Amino acid sequence: MPKPESPGTLAHKLWEQWPSYAAYVVSFVTIGVIWINHHAMLRRVQTVDHSVLIRNLLLLMLIAVLPWTTALLAEYLREDDGQHLAAAIYGGSLLAMALSFFAMQRYLLVVRPGLVVETLGPGERAAIMRRNMVGLVPYLIATAVAPLSSYLVLAICGAVGLYYALPVTTTD
């Protein structure tokens, strides 16, 4: 939040905070897509076991970390010291969340297929797994390129969010 007592116009102060807005938008889209795909995943479940509950709790914990990693990236994106570490933490948090989501999908669709509705055939299960796997690679790349460019991390993570926001890529 811009401070009234700091020099410059409000418009200039708001412009200086563009990294906060960019990180917020990327994270909002990502969390929104997670919510949509989580909802789609749960519509396919007919019953749960204790492992599903624990996996879901882990996923929710990793999602709950995203506001903190978003704020960290926004704060350090244009700083000379710390921007690459902040970007690695941000990319790593999204990678961890994506891995958790993928692990839960795999558990439901491959390890314990009896937990999902019977109308979901092997071909549909494989297609869902492929769509989920697609997001892992860019998050891994984003985390790996953090030492080179924090902006590239934000761009890659934003592209993943936009990709999964497309109706054809939801896991429904």
Image (spheres, rainbow, N blue to C red):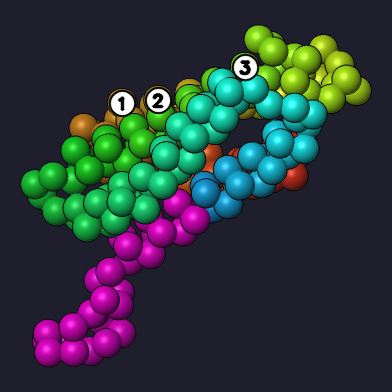
Q: Position of residue 151 (x, y in %)?
A: 31, 46
- Give the spatial CA distance, label 3 vs label 2: 21 Å
- Amino acid type, residue under disc 2 in the picture: Leu
Cα gap from disc 3 to disc 1, whole angstroms? 27 Å
Residue 115 in view here: yes
Q: SS class of the residue under badge 1? A: helix
Residue at 86 percent of width and 16 percent of height = 121
Image quarter of residue 7:
bottom left
Q: Earlier in the sequence, mark 3 or mark 1?
A: 3
Is residue 120 shown left or right of residue 149? right
Reading the image, the residue beneath label 3 is 107
Choose mark 3 or mark 2, whichever is in front: 3
Q: Please give the residue where the numbered disc 2 appears in the rendered image.
A: 140
Is residue 11 within the magenta segment?
yes
Q: Residue at x 46, y 59 (%)?
A: 25
The mark lying in front, picked from 3 and 1, is 3
Quadrant for the C terminus, please. top right
Visible in this render: residue 133?
A: no
Q: Mark 1: few, some, or many residues within 10 Å (few <14, many ≥20)?
A: some
Element under disc 2: helix
Nearest the camera: 2 or 113? 113
Describe residue 90's horizontal placement relative to residue 128 as left or right.
left
Magenta segment boundaries in residue numbering: 1-28
Q: Main secondary structure of the magenta part?
A: helix
Q: Amino acid at mark 3?
A: Tyr
Indicate whether residue 108 is drawn in magenta. Answer: no
For the residue marked with disc 1, what is the amino acid?
Ala
Residue behind mark 1: 144
Whether tag 1 and tag 2 are in contact, CB under 8 A, the answer is: yes
Ranked by sequence position, the earlier of labels 3 and 2 is 3
Task: Tell me where residue 95 sits by quadrant.
Answer: top left
Residue 166 x/y as whole percent: 69, 45
